[in-house]
Image: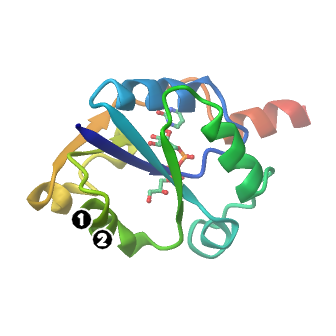
């Protein structure tokens, strides 16, 4: 079984996120999503999420392409996750291109094209107009 992992905040889940997750799943048989906790978002990404971790987790778990959701609590957990979950493929959107090449010692690293026209920030800004 080819195991894929990806990481993210996935706040205000939108079709850009879902297209990423669907393409990630197609790269293997089992997709794990490491979901940024509220604390990690606030402290490390300066992101104040609209939905809580539990709400974001439930939405991801409802997606057919997602097999498991685990917490992302720090930047440094990726190597351990890849080893503990026996990951074959690490996937991120290409806004992260190159950032995680150090993981190539452990598994395949693939950057998928980001869906350009949509983002959580754009949704928030459009709704404020
Ligand atoms: N994404 C995408 N298209 C969009 C928006 C997001 O393909 N229009 C992808 C991103 O490239 C990322 C994933 O969806 O791979 C999740 O995006 P975010 O929730 O913004 O996650 P991010 O803040 O990039 O967190 O340790 C890694 C971080 O947790 C990644």
**Circle 2 residues within 10 Å: few <14, some 14–19, many ≥20:** few
Q: Is residue 87 left or right of residue 115?
A: left
Q: Which residue is mark 2?
A: 80
The answer to whether 82 is drawn above or below residue 25 in the figure is: below
The answer to whether 33 is drawn above or below residue 44 in the figure is: above
Q: Is residue 41 left or right of residue 48?
A: left
**Circle 1 residues within 10 Å: few <14, some 14–19, many ≥20:** few
Q: Are marks 2 and 1 in contact (CB under 8 Å)?
A: yes
Q: Residue at x 90, y 37 (%)?
A: 128
Q: Residue extending furthest left?
A: 105
Q: Is residue 86 left or right of residue 119?
A: left
Q: Position of residue 95 (x, y in %)?
A: 39, 43
Q: Position of residue 1 (x, y in %)?
A: 23, 37
Q: Which residue is mark 1?
A: 83
Q: What mark, if any, has residue 52 been given in the picture?
A: none
Please tell me which residue lies in front, 20 or 107: 107
Quadrant location of the C terminus in the rendered image: top right
Q: Residue at x 37, y 29 (%)?
A: 25
Q: Position of residue 117 (x, y in %)?
A: 57, 23
Marks 2 and 1, Cα distance to the nearest angstrom? 5 Å
Q: Quadrant of residue 11?
A: top right
Q: Quadrant of residue 15?
A: top right
Please tell me which residue lies in front, 8 or 33: 33
The image shows a total of numbered marks equal to: 2
Secondary element at image label 1: helix
The answer to whether 62 is drawn above or below residue 32 in the figure is: above
Q: Residue at x 70, y 44 (%)?
A: 58
Q: Residue at x 20, y 46 (%)?
A: 88
Secondary element at image label 2: helix
Please tell me which residue lies in front, 1 or 56: 1
Q: Position of residue 124 (x, y in %)?
A: 79, 39
């Amino acid at each position: 079984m080819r195991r894929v992992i990806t990481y993210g905040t996935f706040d205000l889940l939108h079709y850009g996120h879902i297209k990423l997750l669907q393409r990630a799943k197609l790269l293997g048989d089992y997709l794990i999503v490491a979901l940024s906790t509220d604390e990690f978002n606030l402290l490390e990404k300066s992101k104040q999420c609209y939905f809580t971790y539990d709400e974001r987790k439930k939405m991801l778990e409802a997606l057919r392409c997602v097999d498991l959701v685990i917490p992302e609590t720090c930047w440094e957990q990726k190597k351990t996750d890849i080893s503990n979950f026996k990951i074959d493929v690490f996937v991120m959107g290409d806004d992260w291109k190159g950032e995680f090449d150090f993981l190539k010692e452990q598994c395949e690293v693939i950057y998928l094209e980001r869906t350009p026209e949509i983002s959580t920030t754009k949704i928030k800004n459009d709704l404020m107009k």
